[in-house]
Image (spheres, grey):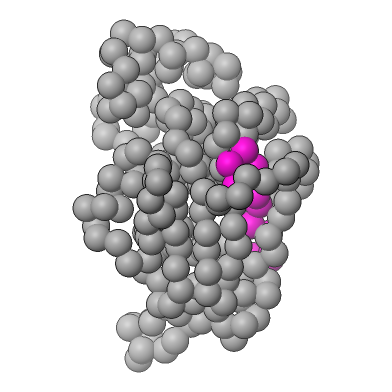
Amino acid sequence: MSKPSLPILSVSGVAKTFILHLREGARLPVVNGAGFDLYAGECVALGGPSGAGKSSLLKMVYGNYRVDEGTIRVRDGEEMVDVASTSPRRLIKLRDTTMGYVSQFLRVIPRVGARDVVAEPLIHDGVPPEEAVARAGALLARLNLPERLWNLPPATFSGGEQQRVNIARGLIAHRPLLLMDEPTASLDAANRNVVVELIAEKKRAGVAILGIFHDAEVREAACDRVIDVTDFAKAAA
């Protein structure tokens, strides 16, 4: 796949060490010298063994973890915003318009029905509520969530059902950069295949996707390349 000249995400020289304050300030290096670019229309997996820093790196890109050194620049229109140094207000705006995130766990307002949970990002973008709810229902149906559950709060669902709601919410609105943390971990084979199809559709729409995919079949089917974070972890040791 030919790459456009300008990346959607550019990570350069990123280092992170956790300070364990309950362990007398012990230092736990995570990554050092992490760097890569991500382009529109490609899906890239963060690879490496458990504990190598994949989830930490993903959370640094989203701004949930602070960065000790380096830059994490995300393209927002004509501007490259450095997540590592930007203001909280600018980071919130970046998340609202540019970065989507599918985490391992669904965190939503209690007592809100699943279909409304999924529709909310579209409504936030200005889509009329009736259209947003219809599109949310169609996506939930595609992910094989029974219609009888759509008006029920996801907190009452099984882990796999909650994850399907989580995926639908993360994918329903267009965001140029999409981060995915083990999105298929709780899914059966049929729904894993649906997620692979949805990722392919996002790629065709020009979305840049960075994710952690422990399922080898999903990773091989969905991803264009793998960035092994092991070297970044070794450099931090």
Q: In the image, is 47 to the left or to the right of 121?
A: right
Q: Which is nearer the eye, 126 or 109?
A: 126
x, y percent for residue 222: 70, 38
x, y percent for residue 83: 37, 60
x, y percent for residue 217: 77, 41
x, y percent for residue 236: 57, 82
Q: Can you say which quadrant of the picture contains the N terminus? A: top right
Q: Residue at x 57, y 16 (%)?
A: 142
Q: Dividing the picture into quarters, in which one does residue 130 lie?
A: top left
Instruction: Answer above or below: position of 140 versus 99.
Output: above
Count of labels shown? 0
Regarding residue 59, the answer to whether it shows in the image is: no
Q: Residue furthest left?
A: 89
Q: Which is nearer the eye, 120 or 207?
A: 207
Q: Can you say which quadrant of the picture contains the C terminus? A: bottom right
Q: Residue at x 49, y 43 (%)?
A: 177
Q: In the image, is 209 to the left or to the right of 89?
A: right
Q: In the image, is 34 to the left or to the right of 221?
A: left
Q: Residue at x 42, y 28 (%)?
A: 173
Identify the main secondary structure in magenta: loop
Residue 174 covered by magenta stretch: no
Q: Residue at x 36, y 15 (%)?
A: 132
Regarding residue 200, the answer to whether it shows in the image is: yes
Q: In the image, is 227 to the left or to the right of 156?
A: right
Instruction: Answer above or below: position of 214 versus 112.
Output: below
Q: Which is nearer the eye, 116 or 100?
A: 100
In the rendered structure, which segment of residues is drawn in magenta? Answer: 39-51
Residue 48 covered by magenta stretch: yes
